[in-house]
Image (spheres, helix red, strand yellow):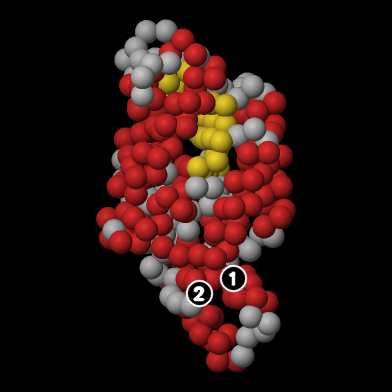
Amino acid sequence: MKWWRLIAAAGLAAGGLTGVAYALFTTQSRRARVIIGVPDAPPLRADGVYGDHPGRPIRFAVLGDSMAAGLGVDTPEELPGVLLARALAEETATPIRLETYAISGSTTDDLPSQVDRVVTDPPDVALVIIGANDVTTRTPIPRSAATLGTQTARLRDAGIGVVVGTCPDLGAIRPIGQPLRAVASEYSHRLARAQRQAVLDAGGVPVALGDLLAAEFTTRSRDYFSRDQFHPSAAGYEAATSILLAPLYEAVLTHHDDLRHEW
């Protein structure tokens, strides 16, 4: 996580940093890197068919970064893709085939290669979660949003229902001290707003993860963050999937209207 780029962003926003302020931001970024560290293993994988129901499985793809991939959980059953696949199978009474393309550490600039793989054999519905690493690397917001919009449009053109979880609020991450945490939060929200419009313009469905989850993650940080204090825990992923399920269910129904029933 290149927090020094956030330091640069803070300096530009404030018209330049004094030596004392720069030293403070540098110290905070260094402490955050030490506490969070580097993942010692890749995310777990548990692709396959979920739900003991008859019929052809509905194919559900997950793209994006470590949050999409589920880094931070201890068992495959806790992965967000698995939680959503099981819930969708229950709601639709149809088997769901989970296909994970998300790669830990990805920024939006890495999304086209994931989409390349997905559109060669399009699934029914796709979930994209991306943006946190764009904040830590200070990827320019217009470029990030435009890339997300283009890739969402590619998925939609392939006939895939698309739900996008926009950038989470990095201001909820406790190892980032103030005022660097405030900078991260402000950048997160600016990116999420730009992502939302780009996804809407491309025909996808945005879900504002930062707006909907930040307060809960802040007040229940011990429960909702994993041991690295950066990625969600099983409880954190459960909270996130609870707000992603309804729009994903609606996206499934665009392909399978016969499955519609009272929510």
Q: Quadrant of the N terminus?
A: bottom right
Q: Nearer the viewer, residue 42 or 227?
A: 227
Q: How busy is the neighbourhood of tag 2: few (under 14 within 10 Å), some, or many (20 plus)?
A: many
- Give residue 141's quadrant in the image: bottom right
Residue 255 vertical position relative to residue 78 in the rendered view, above or below: above
The image shows residue 162 at horizontal and vertical percentages of 57, 32
Residue 150 vertical position relative to residue 91 in the rendered view, above or below: below
Q: Amino acid at mark 1?
A: Leu
Is 124 on the left or on the right of 262, as rendered?
A: right
Q: Nearer the viewer, residue 158 or 214?
A: 214
Any part of residue 110 in sight? no
Q: Which mark is residue 6?
A: 1
Question: In the image, what residue occupies the spot 57% across and 27% down?
Answer: 161
Q: How busy is the neighbourhood of tag 1: few (under 14 within 10 Å), some, or many (20 plus)?
A: many
Q: Are marks 2 and 1 in contact (CB under 8 Å)?
A: yes
Question: In the image, what residue occupies the spot 58% across and 67% down?
Answer: 2
- Give residue 37's quadrant in the image: bottom left
Q: Which mark is residue 220?
A: none
Total numbered badges shown on the rendered structure: 2
Query: The residue tagged with tag 1: helix, strand or loop?
Result: helix
Question: In the image, what residue occupies the spot 41% across and 33% down?
Answer: 245
Question: In the image, what residue occupies the spot 42% across and 7% down?
Answer: 55
- Give residue 54's quadrant in the image: top left
The image shows residue 152 at horizontal and vertical percentages of 65, 36
Residue 123 vertical position relative to residue 178 in the rendered view, above or below: above
Q: Amino acid at mark 2?
A: Leu
Query: The residue tagged with tag 2: helix, strand or loop?
Result: helix
Is 219 on the left or on the right of 134, as rendered?
A: left
Residue 169 vertical position relative to residue 180 in the rendered view, above or below: above
Q: Which mark is residue 180?
A: 2
| Nearest to N terminus: mark 2 or mark 1 | 1
How far is disc 2 from disc 1 in space, using C-alphas?
A: 8 Å
